[in-house]
């Protein structure tokens, strides 16, 4: 299932291995420059793979245009693969820039100043534990990517996926143990340019892995297409429950039929003219009870031989049945446009109407309504229909009326009780997210809160906010957060789409 690597990629891999081996012998200017060349080549290769992947993603769009129902599940997975890969790629870029900055930064030409600096990679990746974190993220990414492949091919992908996190082993010497950790193996006392090249290599692994996965997903769109070797007729009725005087409409065709071949169709003894492979039969119905529509479909084989296939379908003629359902659940929420579907079996949608005992109900389409309620309790929706010029009540259903649930307080994407200092510092304020709610797009607004920062060895800092954003009075303390510090939020008030201002529980974060 894996794609063959192009010669350029093979050359990059070989150069990477050779230079890594040379690094163990001597760190000369020539070796450092060679690493720089390899790093630039990998970056160029990553750009080429990105262009290739973009072409593949464009193919998903074409498949969606051709057959959205079949392509949508695979496109959704491809979009998730793209998102996961992009996030990890950016994370690796961040690590590279951190190491470069720790080593002395870049010169006016954008080149790394101290390519031979051995301390920066060790300090960032080992002392600050960024190496173990990277190992964990890469391992999790690999496992996640493998969930998107065809289960039958997973074993093959586990062997061939370029992103492979292996804990290396060295022969060791008098200065260290024989078995090293993954971080020590890759980043302990290696020159800055070598560490940057290693991270670029992981980016290349990610891009190649992304390419393999999305190529497989694209192939899966059509890999399970049926190859029909049998033909059978099928019948589709406009309704199987009708009332006297209404019209029955039946659509008859054969499975796997072609729009260029029109079969001969006979229904209840009458011939039906087929257009683009599909025949439509209509008749008025009468007499309450179960009825049957039957006939034959005759189709010519490629060799000219005709073959007939019989069919039959039952339907019922009787009294009307009514259905009232909330499109989300059997609850109406205050402050929202609650969608309601109403139908009455055997009655055209345009003849059906509905009303509510508490609130306002507006028709938005055939059988579709929007309900707005203002106070908790219960409401009854009643349905009526115009039958033969007379309005008749068909049914009613009771619904509960509730307030929208409380949101979850977060800083960034974290709901506490702990958060990394670096992640907390880059956030702009407090969020109120409504999770696992059936309605999309429901938002809460943070109205006010009090924030307190208890930093080790420093005075307690407190501030009042009248919006979601952190107040200026605590921004200096936030920028100075370190592991072990505490951040407290209390007196939090939020406003929902129903206009209610709610008091929320306190939330605390321990910085680590």
Image (cartoon, helix red, strand yellow):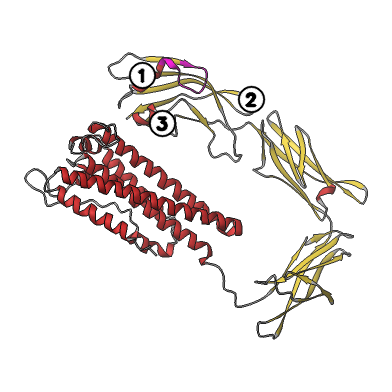
Residue 299 in the image, given as x and y percentages of width and height:
71, 79
Q: Quadrant of the C terminus?
A: top left
| Quadrant in the picture for residue 249 | bottom right
Image vertical order of residue 377 relative to residue 459, above or below: below
- Crowding at label 2, few (<14), some or many (≥20) Cα neighbours within 10 Å? few
Q: Nearer the viewer, mark 2 or mark 1?
A: 1
Based on the picture, tell me whether residue 244 belongs to the magenta stretch. Answer: no
Query: Label 2, on which residue?
Result: 499
Residue 212 appears in the picture as rendered: yes
- Crowding at label 3, few (<14), some or many (≥20) Cα neighbours within 10 Å? some
Image vertical order of residue 448 relative to residue 266, above or below: above
Q: Main secondary structure of the magenta part?
A: loop
Residue 425 in the image, given as x and y percentages of width and height:
38, 26
Q: Earlier in the sequence, mark 2 or mark 3?
A: 3
Pointers 2 and 3 in contact (C-beta within 8 Å): no
Magenta residues (range): 464-473
User: What whole-number distance in Å separates the C-alpha atoms at marks 1 and 3?
Assistant: 19 Å
């Amino acid at each position: 299932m894996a794609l063959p690597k192009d010669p350029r990629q093979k050359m990059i891999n070989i150069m990477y291995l050779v230079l890594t081996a040379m690094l163990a012998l001597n760190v000369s200017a020539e070796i450092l420059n060679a690493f720089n060349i390899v790093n630039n080549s990998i970056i160029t290769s990553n750009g080429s793979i990105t262009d290739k992947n973009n072409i593949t993603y464009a193919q998903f769009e074409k498949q969606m245009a051709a057959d959205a129902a079949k392509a949508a599940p695979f496109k959704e997975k491809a979009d998730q693969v793209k998102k996961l890969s992009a996030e990890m790629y950016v994370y690796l870029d961040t690590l590279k820039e951190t190491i470069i900055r720790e080593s002395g930064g870049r010169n006016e030409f954008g080149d790394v100043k101290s390519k031979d600096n051995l301390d920066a990679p060790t300090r960032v990746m080992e002392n600050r534990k960024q190496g173990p974190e990277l190992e964990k993220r890469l391992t999790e990414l690999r496992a996640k990517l493998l969930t998107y492949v065809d289960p039958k091919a997973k074993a093959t992908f586990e062997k061939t996926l370029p992103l492979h996190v292996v804990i290396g082993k060295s022969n060791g010497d008098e200065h260290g143990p024989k078995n090293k950790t993954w971080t020590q193996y890759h980043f302990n006392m290696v020159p800055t340019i070598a560490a940057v090249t290693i991270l670029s290599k992981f980016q290349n692994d990610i891009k190649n892995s992304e390419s393999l996965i999305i190529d497989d997903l694209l192939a899966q769109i059509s890999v399970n297409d049926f190859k029909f070797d049998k033909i059978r007729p099928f019948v589709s009725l406009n309704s199987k429950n009708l009332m006297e005087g209404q019209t029955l409409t039946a659509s008859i065709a054969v499975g796997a039929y072609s729009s260029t071949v029109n079969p001969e169709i006979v229904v209840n003894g009458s011939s039906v003219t087929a257009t683009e492979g599909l025949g439509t039969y209509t008749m008025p119905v009468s007499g309450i009870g179960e009825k049957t529509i039957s006939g034959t479909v005759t189709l010519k084989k490629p060799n000219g031989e005709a073959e007939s296939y019989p069919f039959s379908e039952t339907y019922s003629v009787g009294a009307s049945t009514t259905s009232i359902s909330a499109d989300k659940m059997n609850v109406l929420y205050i402050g929202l446009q609650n969608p309601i579907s109403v139908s009455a079996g055997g009655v055209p949608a345009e003849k059906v109407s509905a009303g509510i005992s508490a609130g306002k109900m507006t028709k938005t389409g055939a059988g579709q309504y929007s309900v707005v309620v203002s106070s908790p309790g219960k409401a009854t929706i009643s349905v009526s229909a115009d039958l033969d010029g007379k309005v008749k009540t068909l049914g009613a259903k009771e619904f509960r009326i509730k307030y929208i649930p409380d949101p979850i307080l977060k800083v960034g994407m974290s709901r506490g009780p702990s958060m990394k200092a670096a992640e907390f510092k880059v956030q702009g304020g407090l969020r109120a997210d409504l999770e696992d709610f059936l309605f999309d797009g429901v938002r809460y607004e943070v109205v006010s809160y009090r924030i307190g920062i208890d930093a080790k060895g420093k005075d307690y800092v407190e501030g009042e906010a009248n919006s979601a954003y952190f107040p200026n009075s605590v921004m200096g303390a936030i920028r100075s957060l370190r592991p072990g510090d505490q951040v407290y939020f209390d007196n939090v008030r939020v406003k929902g789409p129903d206009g209610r201002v709610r008091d929320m529980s306190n939330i605390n974060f321990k910085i680590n």
